[in-house]
Image (cartoon, rainbow, N blue to C red):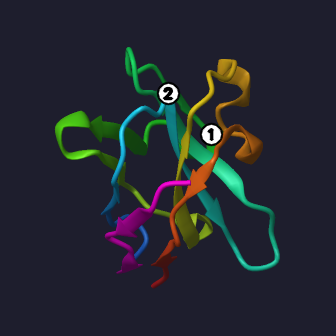
Amino acid sequence: QVPMVEAGGGSVQPGGSLRLSCVFSAAGYNQLAWFRQAPGQEREGVAALYTRGGNTVYADSVKGRFTISQDNSKNTLRLQMNDLKSEDSGEYYCAAGTRWSDWRRLLKADSYDSWGQGTQVTVAS
C-alpha cells in the first residue's frame, strides 16, 4: 500500500460545489477511484478512471454533476463535485489499484489496493 492523502472536504449548502484532491506518493497504478461512505451505509464507488487512456466511470447518482480527473505530473487525483445534494454527504476516500479491472468492476472496493484516510463532505442547508 502507498500513502494517499485526501483534502478539500467541508460543509456546503445544497447546490454548491467542492473539489476534492488526493495526493499519492508513488506511480504505477492502473486505476484510481473515489468512494464515499455515509453513516450506517456501505462504502460505494462514486467515480473511477483508468490511468492510461483516462476512460472514466461514474455512479448513476453523480453522472453529470461530478468529474474525476488525474494530474500525472503531480500524482494527484481530483473530484470536482457540482450541484451537491444532501445525499452526497459522507466520508470520501480515494483509492488506487495496481490491477486492470473490467470497467464493470471499477466502482467495486475490492478492485483497489491502497486507500486514503478519508475527508468529510457535508451538504446541508
Where, quadrant-wise, is the C terminus in this rendering? bottom left
Where residue 116 sits: x, y (%)? 51, 64
97 w.r.t. 44: above or below: above
Mark 1 crowdedness (10 Å alpha carbons): few <14, some 14-19, many ≥20? some
Residue 30 — which label? 2
Residue at 57% x, 72% y: name it. Answer: 91
Q: Where is residue 77 in the image (x, y as percent from the top left)?
A: 35, 47
**In the picture provided, is 82 more to the left or to the right than 123?**
left
Which residues lie in the magenta part? 1-12
Q: Along the polypeptide, which appears first: circle 2 or circle 1? A: 2
Q: From where the camera sits, is residue 12 visible?
A: no
Q: Residue at x 62, y 66 (%)?
A: 87
Q: Would you say residue 3 sits in the magenta stretch?
A: yes
Cα distance in 3D space between marks 2 and 1: 19 Å
Answer whether labels 2 and 1 touch (C-beta < 8 Å).
no
Q: Which of 107 and 38 is in front in this view?
A: 107
Disc 2 crowd, CA 10 A, few/some/many (<14, 14-19, 20+): some
User: What residue sits right under mark 1 in the picture?
Assistant: 59
Residue 79 picture location, percent across and down: 37, 50
Is residue 99 at all visible to an observer of this figure? yes
- Whether residue 23 appears in magenta in the rendering, the answer is no
Q: Is residue 53 above or below residue 76?
A: above
Look at the picture and state if 104 lies above or below 26.
Answer: above
- Amino acid type for the residue under numbered disc 2: Asn
**Residue closer to the observer: 18 or 124:** 18
Assign a secondary structure to mark 1: loop
Given the current orientation, which residue lies at the most extreme top position?
Answer: 53
Q: Which tag is nearer the camera, tag 2 or tag 1?
A: 2
- Which image quarter is the N terminus in? bottom right
Residue 64: percent from left, percent from top: 44, 37
Q: Is residue 94 left or right of residue 110?
A: left
Residue beneath the point at 63% across and 47% down = 113
